[in-house]
Image (cartoon, grey):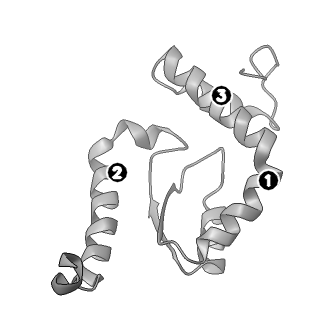
Amino acid sequence: LNKYRDEPATEAIAAAKLTMLHLPDPQMTYAFSRYMRAYDENKRITKPLVASVLGSVPTLAIHCRDDTYSHFSESVQLSKCHPSIELRLLERGGHLQVFNDPVTLAEHVLGFVDARLSRAPEPDVADSRA
């Protein structure tokens, strides 16, 4: 599934080759390559669906400024178009290396969820008993 495995490194495919190289183990590399292949084969269908949902669902986007695969400016533009997106730009973490720092990811995700919970209206206890 690594479609560039036997290709020489060129500027056009360097990011994809580097992404596959920095995954920590072969099983993770395989799972990620299947995900990327499915995404690539279905993005014509999924892009319009995602765009329609982003207007109504609070979304956290975490992107690293040193991502060589997908430039962080894409996330900046996406967050400008969809106010429901809360963008957190991290200085370091590349495209996938950020997953090697679960504490940082957990802090951002939990902070995002906690902020929404604190703004949520209190449930009406009388209605829940009916």
Tags 3 and 2 in contact by the CB under 8 Å rule? Answer: no
How far apart marks 1 and 3 lie (CA) works out to 17 Å
Horizontal side of 58 relative to 83 (left or right) equals left
Quarter occupied by the N terminus? top right
Residue shown at 78%/23% (left/top)?
3
Horizontal side of 105 relative to 32 (left or right) equals left
The amino acid sitting under disc 1 is Ile
Return the residue at label 1. Answer: 45
The label shown at residue 27 is none
Is residue 108 shown to the viewer in this render?
Answer: yes
Would you identify the image quadrant in which residue 108 lies? Answer: bottom left
Quarter occupied by the C terminus? bottom left
Q: State which tag comes first along the sequence, 3 or 2.
A: 3
Tags 1 and 3 in contact by the CB under 8 Å rule? Answer: no
- Dot 2 lies on which element? helix
How far apart marks 1 and 2 lie (CA) works out to 29 Å
Would you identify the image quadrant in which residue 13 lies? Answer: top right
Percent coordinates x, y for residue 82 in the rendering = 61, 77
The amino acid sitting under disc 2 is Leu
Residue shown at 31%/66% (left/top)?
113
Return the residue at label 3. Answer: 34
Q: Which circle, 1 or 2, is nearer the viewer?
A: 1
The label shown at residue 105 is 2
Q: State which tag comes first along the sequence, 1 or 2.
A: 1
Percent coordinates x, y for residue 114 in the rendering = 25, 69
Q: Which circle, 1 or 3, is nearer the viewer?
A: 1
Residue shown at 22%/77% (left/top)?
128
Crowd around label 1: few <14 · some 14–19 · many ≥20 (10 Å): few
